[in-house]
Image (cartoon, helix red, strand yellow):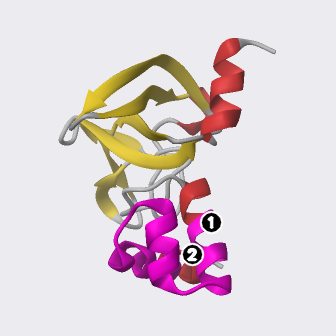
Amino acid sequence: MRASKVVRVLVGVEHTVVESVQAEDVAGETVLLVRVRPDRSARSRCSRCGRRSRGYDRGDGRRRWRGLDFGTVRVVVEADAPRVSCRQHGVVVAAVPGARARSRFTRDFEDTAAWLAAHAPGSVVAELLRVTWRSVSSIVTRVVAEA
């Protein structure tokens, strides 16, 4: 199995090309930064309906999404977030493989948080995943809305 495929599987981002993986020191904590870009099949899609759309502009540049921790190391996925012009939704940020629209977390992170929230108090989930309980609440709302 190629190294980039192993990284995609471990980080939980499908339909992407891994550009680089590096360890960064952020506030005295090591963070694994995985830079990705959508592969050809996932490029230029509306983040709301998933339809292929025309490019509009580069948006606000690169964005970051929190991924599931790799052992005790936090994982952050970084990718460009251009905007597209969807026929139905107008100008929106393009879909990012592995993340829901309007989220700062990867899909795997959110699915895990929602499952944990169904089995434990939100404060416990927040502490376990190292996020705020408000983030857990927002995640559960997004996951339930999608289901």
Tell me the residue that label 1 is attached to: 111
Does 28 lie within the magenta span? no
What secondary structure do most residues of the magenta stretch adopt?
helix
Q: Are marks 2 and 1 in contact (CB under 8 Å)?
A: yes
Q: Is residue 14 left or right of residue 139?
A: right
Q: Height in image: 22 above or below 84? A: above
Residue with the most extreme top position: 2
Please report the bounds of the magenta region as a residue range. 112-140
Closer to the eye: label 2 or 1: 1
Which residue appears at 29% of the width and 41% of the height?
63
Q: Which residue is mark 2?
A: 143
Separation (CA) of disc 2 from disc 1: 7 Å
- Looking at the rendered structure, the kind of residue marked 2 is Val
Residue 113 on image: x %, y %: 57, 69
The answer to whether residue 50 is visible is no
Q: What SS does tag 1 mark?
A: helix
Front residue of this view, candidates 77 and 16: 77
